[in-house]
Amino acid sequence: MIEKYAACLYYKDSGFLRSYLEGEEIPQRPYLTFRSMYRLPYFFRFEWQDHFTEDSPWREHLVGCDGQTAFAKYEGSGLKELSSLKYAIAEANAATRNAVAQVSQHFPEIDLLPISWLNRHKNLTWIGTEPANGKECFCIASSVKNAQDSMLWIACDDFSLRRVKTYTLVRADNANQVEDMARKLDAGDVDASGLLAERQRAYIETNYEEIVFDRELAIKEFAMPKE
């Protein structure tokens, strides 16, 4: 997979994110959709749409580089130039729940591939094969921050990344906040066990539906948008 992306001169995809708690049904509607484009060496465009609730309107944003100038445009704040494409990606990373970093880390001119990717995913374990977004995939468990806290679905035929699922442990209460406040106030040990609820895993799924390798993309597609 690393070789596939590293040798790619042009790249394009679209996809969506879903989030849910362990034990919940996987939601059918995404809360964030995105589209990515890349052209060697420094042309990049990542667009995403998000909304706060299912009833709220979708908001449109983008980060990119026209080959020389990096930029970002967020709904409600307008267009701005940025110091570098890496800075633009870093700025958008939290808002996109790692979707923009997940794409950009595969390309050597944007990040430090393959070192950066291998630094993020260690202790790879093959689980088996299963379909994901229309492709039969190798299912791989990896460790990013904690043991096997990420799952990867890599297409068997073209080694494209089709799905990434990460999880964190969360609580349904405010026990952590109580313990942190006690430390700040130097109140010594505080027993917050009465506030503790059973921990649940919170999942974030990044899904890639349409991926196109090495189909030429015109430079004009990466142009900085107008105000």
Image (cartoon, grey):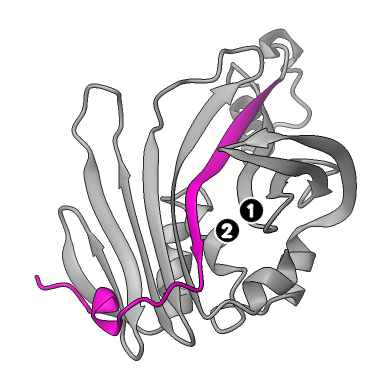
Q: What stretch is highlighted in magenta?
A: 200-227
Residue 5, image x and y in percent? 63, 70
Classify residue 151 as left or right of residue 185.
right
Q: Which residue lies furthest to the top in this view?
A: 194
What residue appears at the point 78 percent right and 66 percent down from the top-left corner?
A: 119
Labelled pair 1, 2 in contact (Cβ < 8 Å): yes
Amino acid at dot 2: Gln
Q: How many marks?
A: 2
Residue 218, image x and y in percent? 30, 80
Residue 102, which numbered label? 2
Label 1 packing within 10 angstroms: few (<14), some (14-19), many (20+):
many
Amino acid at dot 1: Leu
Considering the image in quadrants, where does the N terminus appear? bottom right
Please determine whether, in this image, residue 66 is positioned above or below residue 152. below
Residue 91, image x and y in percent? 42, 64
Query: Label 1 belongs to which residue?
Result: 161
